[in-house]
Amino acid sequence: MTRTTVLKNLRIIDPSRNLDEAGSIVIENGRIAAIGSGAQNQGAPEGAEIVDGRGRIAAPGLVDARVFVGEPGAEHRETIESASRAAAAGGVTTFIMMPDTDPVIDDIALVEFVLKTARDKAVVNIHAAAALTKHLAGEEMTEFGLLKAAGAVAFTNGRNPMHNAQVLRRAMTYAREFGSVIALETRDKHLGAGGVMNEGLLASWLGLSGTPREAELIPLERDLRIAGLTRAKYHAAQISVPESAEAVKIARERGANVTCAASINHLTLNENDIGEYRTFFKLSPPLRGEDDRKAMVDALARGEIDIIVSSHDPQDVDTKRLPFADAADGAIGLETMLAAALRLHHSGEVPLMRLIDALSTRPAKIFGLDAGTLAPGARADIVLIDPDEPWLAVKDGFVSRSKNTPFEDARFTGRAVSTYVAGERVHSLG
């Protein structure tokens, strides 16, 4: 039996086709059958379920390329199921799970475990990124071919930077043969070692050790050179300073196949938010100065920063309710990524089309995922957004098992009001 749903009275924004128009979306058996003003003029097929969008924005479901989940090994912080529900609440219909689990996702059995658990329990699409090196130790490569065949969509060392350039060169060479993406966070092993926030005057006032921007830049420029040498697909998983975006731009001009991401935290927060040692703002890389933040937003608007990630990293009271220098890095972000990003739209800094491109279409393209588009025939992964809905980010209102959000009690304007995965509504604000 054909199941049909019609979402009408929408403003449809689809960066994959540069589409921004009023209209309807017709969903049949989990896929988009028709879309746009033409679909609205045709009316609804007989027996279809009709949903009035009331002028809200319909966009491709968001794609988050950097999500840490506790399962297996730290289910008290986050499970695959709870992360999926948090994602749905934030308008995220697809995410890539990092391999930083216990045990590490560095063999076929663990990739299969993640994908099977996601099929059985998750309400959104979850893909696994496999470990680049065994145990994330940075010395011995994993079995790229077997892991990709098992379903891994990228290779990464997760939170751990790669220090061995020769191992990285070999890894990029192998990844190129399989058409796989290498995604790395860059952090120098010694420069700024022990740093817990951005190096500068504020760190001195707070009596905290700082991390200079060069600790990110130097290994990034090395990685970009190796990517050019090997002709591999390289993705800088999380940059925090505009010089990094400039380095990626220059590498592209040299012909390297490279992309980069910034977390929503580094685009909407700065080091001053740390205030009186607020550990929910302790991140890696650290929050930078306001001038850096503004320059990063400009780079995002120009497309030099390709995508936005939540860098969702659940921590509990045992790892966060500590002195600032001792607290673990990381913050949850699946439920606030869209709302925080809309701040950049409301301020006039980033056009809405570019924002949705960075949150959905471009990450899907970089990692080769079936997502990020509302084209006819595509899977009906859709987020309905009310860009003017005011709400307060109350800690007890989060779906995630962990509550370590830097946006606690923040006032937002705009959020996901409904989320559809393969035509099924998996989240609604009532």
Image (cartoon, rainbow, N blue to C red):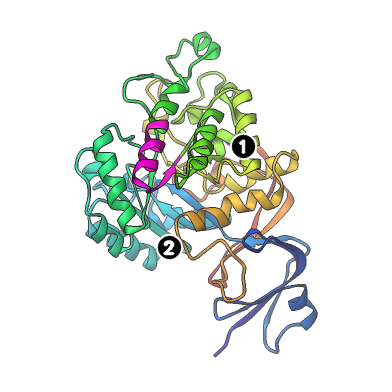
Q: Nearer the viewer, residue 336 or 345?
A: 345
Query: In the current view of this chain or complex, which residue is farthest to the front?
Result: 254
Residue 383: x percent and y percent? 62, 61
Question: Which residue lies under the disc numbered 2?
Answer: 122
Q: Residue at x 34, y 63 (%)?
A: 115
On screen, residue 363 above or below 41 = above
On screen, residue 414 above or below 251 = below
User: Is residue 59 toward the left or the right of residue 20 in the image?
Assistant: left
**Quadrant (top left/top right/bottom left/bottom right) for the N terminus:** bottom right
Confirm whether the magenta stretch covers residue 261.
no
Q: Nearer the viewer, residue 384 or 351?
A: 351
Q: CA distance from mark 1 to mark 2?
A: 34 Å
Q: Nearer the viewer, residue 62 or 177?
A: 177
Residue 105: x percent and y percent? 27, 51
Residue 178: x percent and y percent? 32, 58
Q: Residue at x 52, y 41 (%)?
A: 253
Residue 129: x percent and y percent? 35, 52
Query: In the current view of this chain or complex, which residue is farthest to the left?
Result: 140
Q: Amino acid at mark 1?
A: Ala
Q: Is residue 336 visible?
A: no
Q: Residue at x 69, y 53 (%)?
A: 353
Q: Nearer the viewer, mark 1 or mark 2?
A: 1
On screen, residue 251 above or below 115 = above
Magenta stretch, residue numbers: 221-237
User: Is residue 214 toward the left or the right of residue 15 in the image?
Assistant: left
Which label belongs to residue 299? 1
User: Is label 1 in a helix, a strand or a loop?
Assistant: helix
Q: Residue at x 38, y 63 (%)?
A: 118
